[in-house]
């Protein structure tokens, strides 16, 4: 993608905000007025991947099917011994959810797991996963569970303990609860989405745990809001060689094709990021006009715009050295794709380069080819969670395609 100069036409600017990933300063200059275009609905129909077809990566990379025939694999976690966990969960209104975590073991490193087992089942919309010491944590939609864990085990049979109650489900796909541990392992961070689009119902205002990233001790004590005003933060990761937590956030609907851009941002302790009263800094939402000018004034500007309605969900910094140097230390972002837009946006994995601890842009399309036929609203799949293996390859959870893809660098 290219930067858009300030002299571009209004229509070009609107397209850029909706479809491109830009620095905050650039994206802010391009923001259209609310309702500049009607609120559109264009939902994708997933038709599955034809035999022999895969997503498309840049030259020098090879894309292969790491695991198929999963049931809506939405999130991935690599265990300390290299086993891969896939959380299989589905938004209830689209059908029954598997509510399980599947383990995939590629012992010989050939890119095809030879062991596959049900690691944990009987869950309630599981998503985030985490190992700390001899404990395994999983975030159901309504609580954080802890289980005893030994490295290498193929299945957890012992009962878990709910150590934190969380508000369950939420607006559209806002049932996801992600997890990450601080660099020193002393705290766990939990992402919780909003119950509404923009809280015109005054529901979220009654529960500060919503639209926030929470912090808690590994035993479940000391729960507090680490940062708020984050409509639906999902992917979280720590910038390499820093104590800086970053997240990607899904922004609000029904303000038009090109509002409001999803974003990537550093999560500042105690900060308020605007939702529902303001967006993309201190731009007041017309549906909350005049209600909380104090919070509008407090709204922190995000660091990097990712395009409106892209459903930016996955986030993983690239810590390996297998990919070319341009990728080192940058962020891979899984964009599941739009529904509240007249033309598709997202449906790809983006790469955002970083320098000196900051995203520099321009963002680059890294994994594409998920859209089959936009005119017919058909897609092959939809990328969500992203993570890296010890060999430096990238894994991508394609929930609608029931597949986990592996992207490896071959140099040819």
Image (spheres, helix red, strand yellow):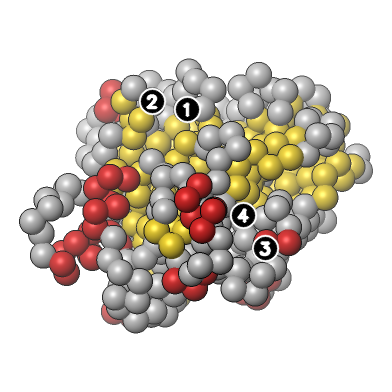
Q: Can you say whether 292 is above or below 408 in the image?
A: below
- The image quadrant of residue 24 is top left
Element at label 2: loop
Question: Residue at the location (61% across, 22% down)?
Answer: 183
Between 97 and 70, which is closer to the camera in this rendering?
97
The residue singled out by tag 2 in the image is 357
Question: Residue at the location (60% across, 47% down)?
Answer: 228
- Tell whether label 2 touches label 4 (CB within 8 Å): no
- Tell whether label 4 touches label 3 (CB within 8 Å): yes
The residue singled out by tag 1 in the image is 239
Task: Find the distance from the CA under tag 4 to the CA under tag 2.
Answer: 25 Å
Neighbour tally class for label 1: few under 14, some 14-19, many 20 plus, Cα within 10 Å: many
- Tell whether label 1 touches label 2 (CB within 8 Å): yes
**Which tag, 4 or 2, sits closer to the chain's start?**
4
Element at label 3: helix
Q: Can you say whether 339 is above or below 159 in the image?
A: below
Residue 330 in view here: yes
Task: Find the distance from the CA under tag 4 to the CA under tag 1.
Answer: 22 Å
Neighbour tally class for label 2: few under 14, some 14-19, many 20 plus, Cα within 10 Å: some
The residue singled out by tag 3 in the image is 204
Give coordinates of residue 172: x percent, y percent: 59, 69
Which mark is nearer the camera, 4 or 1?
A: 4
Between 326 and 19, which is closer to the camera in this rendering?
19
- Tell whether label 3 touches label 1 (CB within 8 Å): no
**Which tag, 1 or 3, sits closer to the chain's start?**
3
Element at label 1: loop
Element at label 4: loop
Task: Find the distance from the CA under tag 3 to the CA under tag 4.
Answer: 8 Å
Give coordinates of residue 211: x percent, y percent: 61, 54
The residue singled out by tag 4 in the image is 211
């Amino acid at each position: 993608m290219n930067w858009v100069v300030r002299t571009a036409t209004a229509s070009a600017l609107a397209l850029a905000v909706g479809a491109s990933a830009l620095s905050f300063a650039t994206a802010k200059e391009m923001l259209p007025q609310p309702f500049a275009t009607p609120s559109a609905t264009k939902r994708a129909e997933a038709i599955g991947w034809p035999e022999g077809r895969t997503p498309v990566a840049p030259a020098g990379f090879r894309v292969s099917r790491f695991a198929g025939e999963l049931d809506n694999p939405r999130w991935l976690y690599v265990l300390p011994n290299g086993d891969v966990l896939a959380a299989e969960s589905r938004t209830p209104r689209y059908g029954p959810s598997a509510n399980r975590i599947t383990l995939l073991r590629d012992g010989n490193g050939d890119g095809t797991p030879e062991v596959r087992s049900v690691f944990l089942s009987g869950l309630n919309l599981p998503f985030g996963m985490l190992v700390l010491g001899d404990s395994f944590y999983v975030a159901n939609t309504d609580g954080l569970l802890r289980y005893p864990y030994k490295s290498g085990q193929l299945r957890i049979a012992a009962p878990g303990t709910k150590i934190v109650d969380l508000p369950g489900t939420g607006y559209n796909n806002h049932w996801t609860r992600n997890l990450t541990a601080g660099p020193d392992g002393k705290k766990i961070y939990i992402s919780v989405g909003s119950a509404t689009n923009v809280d015109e119902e005054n529901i979220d205002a009654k529960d500060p745990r919503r639209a926030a990233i929470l912090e808690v001790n590994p035993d479940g004590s000391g729960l507090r809001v680490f940062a708020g005003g984050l409509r639906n933060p999902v992917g979280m990761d720590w910038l390499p060689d820093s104590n800086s937590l970053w997240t990607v956030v899904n922004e609000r609907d029904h303000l038009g094709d090109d509002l409001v851009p999803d974003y990537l941002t550093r999560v500042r302790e105690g900060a308020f990021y605007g939702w529902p009263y303001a967006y993309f800094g201190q731009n007041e939402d017309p549906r909350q006009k005049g209600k909380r000018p104090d919070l509008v004034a407090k709204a922190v500007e995000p660091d990097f715009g990712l395009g409106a309605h892209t459903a930016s969900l996955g986030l993983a910094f690239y810590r390996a050295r297998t990919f070319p140097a341009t990728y080192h230390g940058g962020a891979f972002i899984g964009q599941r794709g739009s529904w509240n837009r007249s033309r598709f946006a997202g449906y790809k994995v983006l790469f955002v380069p970083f320098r000196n601890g900051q995203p520099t842009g321009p963002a680059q399309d890294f994994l594409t080819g998920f859209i089959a036929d936009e005119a017919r609203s058909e897609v092959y799949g939809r990328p969500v969670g992203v993570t890296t293996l010890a060999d430096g390859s990238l894994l991508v959870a394609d929930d609608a395609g029931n597949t986990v893809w592996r992207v490896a660098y071959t140099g040819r």
